[in-house]
Amino acid sequence: QVQLVESGGGLVQPGGSLRLSCAATGIIFRLYRMGWYRQPPGKQRELVAWIVSGGSTNYADSVKGRFTISRDNAKNTVYLQMNSLKPEDTAVYYCNAEPLIGSTYYWGQGTQVTVSS
């Protein structure tokens, strides 16, 4: 059974930082591109960042220079370090696993991030 379990969300003031974690079980982690998506209130889900096993990354323009995605293949975990947070970063953040071969995607349950003073 595949599980992606996110943690690390919460309430933070503008300019603050949070670190999200996503622990994966039930998949061969190194064979998956791992990503973070977010869904702001009333809006569609959007890509935040992804990372492949070799370390290549991709970021949404809105988070470049502020967010850093990383992964630990030994721990089957992907991280999202979020700095200089803005109110517009408020959203439910979802972890995603996309196979390098195949078409079965997996999602975590989501973790709420609220940026507010």
Image: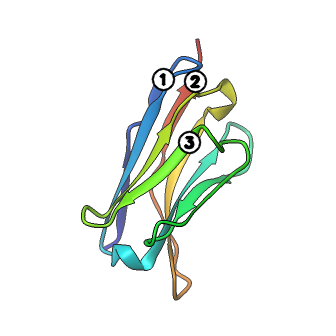
Residue type indicated by callout 2: Val
| x and y percentages locating residue 21 in the rendered image | 38, 47
Is there a contact, CB below 8 Å, between mark 2 and mark 1?
Answer: yes
Task: Specify the color scheme.
Answer: rainbow
When the figure is inspected, residue 14 is found, relative to residue 79, above or below; the finding is: above
State the residue position of label 2: 115
**If the image is split into quadrants, where does the C terminus sit?**
top right
Q: Residue furthest bottom?
A: 101
Disc 3 crowd rating (10 Å Cα; few below 14, some 14-19, many 20+) is many
Residue visible at 42% across and 38% down in the picture: 19
Of mark 2 and mark 1, the one earlier in the sequence is 1
**Outermost residue toward the top?**
117
Report the residue at 59% width, 28% height from top: 85
Which three-letter amino acid code belongs to the residue tagged 1?
Leu
Specify whether 112 is left or right of 116.
Answer: left
Helix, strand or loop at label 1? It is strand
Q: Position of residue 75 (x, y in %)?
A: 25, 61
Q: Which mark is residue 11?
A: 1
Location of residue 27 in the rendering, given as x and y in whole percent from the top left corner: 34, 76
- Secondary structure beneath disc 3? strand
Spatial distance from mark 1 to mark 3, Cα to Cα?
Answer: 17 Å
Whichever of callouts 2 and 3 sits on the residue coming sooner in the sequence is 3
Tell me the residue that label 3 is attached to: 67
The nearer-to-camera label among 2 and 3 is 3
User: Which amino acid type is shown beneath numbered disc 3?
Assistant: Phe
In the picture, the quarter occupied by the N terminus is bottom left
Q: Earlier in the sequence, mark 1 or mark 3?
A: 1
